[in-house]
Amino acid sequence: MSSEQDTKKLLQFRESMEQRILELEQEMSNLQTAMAEIDKLIVNTGFRTFTTADKLVKDEPEPAPEPDQTEEIDEDQLSITSKDGTVLGVMQVENHSIIFTPAEPFDFTLDIPPFESFLIERVLDNMRKTDQERSANGELDPGEILEYEVNNEEGKIVSLTIHNYGGERRLREINSSIRWTFDKMYDKLTQG
């Protein structure tokens, strides 16, 4: 086989690889669109508005409301629940901040995986790094860079506050990441 024939075969192979890359990029774009739609459905159906019916202490009976009172529901406050429906905490969205407060009965500590390895390092640190890069490129105001703080007492997580979370897409991602993380932590607590 001549060198010219080898070169033609390599060029044909390269061309087919380029075509496959284009197909994969299109498939990836379609999958990202589908994931965004799924995220919307999760936000709309997977999180209930926190009401007195979602009491954290389930053993106590709910006192009957007085007839003249109407309960106000804050639509920016969501219960974060485990797969089995247990309320793990409450997430509140105010201005450009998210405040997640774990439910009192649980001792969620900083050292229970995947809090640090997933939620902090993989999700929040990556978002902050992306914001810092966008700010360095002039795409984002430095005051809009994502920041977070974990308030804890002797290692027990009291609250997680995320400032400048960004838009709706990030809100959905943070929402589902918090739910997934604390559901896994809940599994570890209940399984011993």
Image (cartoon, grey):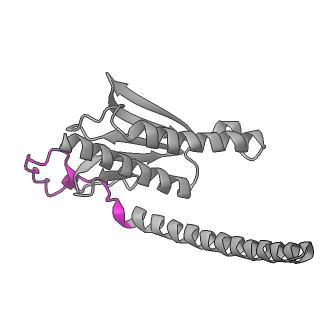
Residue found at x 22% / y 57%: 84
Residue 21, position in %: x, y?
Answer: 70, 70
Residue found at x 51% / y 43%: 122
Residue found at x 42% / y 68%: 41
Quarter of the image with the N terminus in it? bottom right
Q: Residue furthest top?
A: 154
Q: Quadrant of residue 73?
A: bottom left
Residue 16, position in %: x, y?
Answer: 75, 77
Q: Quadrant of residue 104?
A: top left
Quarter of the image with the C terminus in it? top left
Q: Nearer the viewer, residue 71 or 103?
A: 103
Q: Residue furthest front?
A: 1
In this image, 126 relative to 104: left or right?
right
- Is 15 drawn above or below residue 50 in the view shown? below
The stretch of residues the image draws in magenta is: 45-69
Q: Nearer the viewer, residue 30 or 80?
A: 30
Residue 53, position in %: x, y?
Answer: 19, 55
Residue 121, position in %: x, y?
Answer: 50, 38
In this image, 176 relative to 6: left or right?
left
Q: How many marks?
A: 0
**Does 50 lie within the magenta span?**
yes
- Is 148 drawn above or below residue 76 in the view shown? above
Q: Main secondary structure of the magenta part?
A: loop
Q: Nearer the viewer, residue 77 or 9?
A: 9
Q: Nearer the viewer, residue 47 or 76?
A: 47
**Does 187 lie within the magenta span?**
no
Residue found at x 71% / y 45%: 134
In this image, 17 relative to 162: left or right?
right
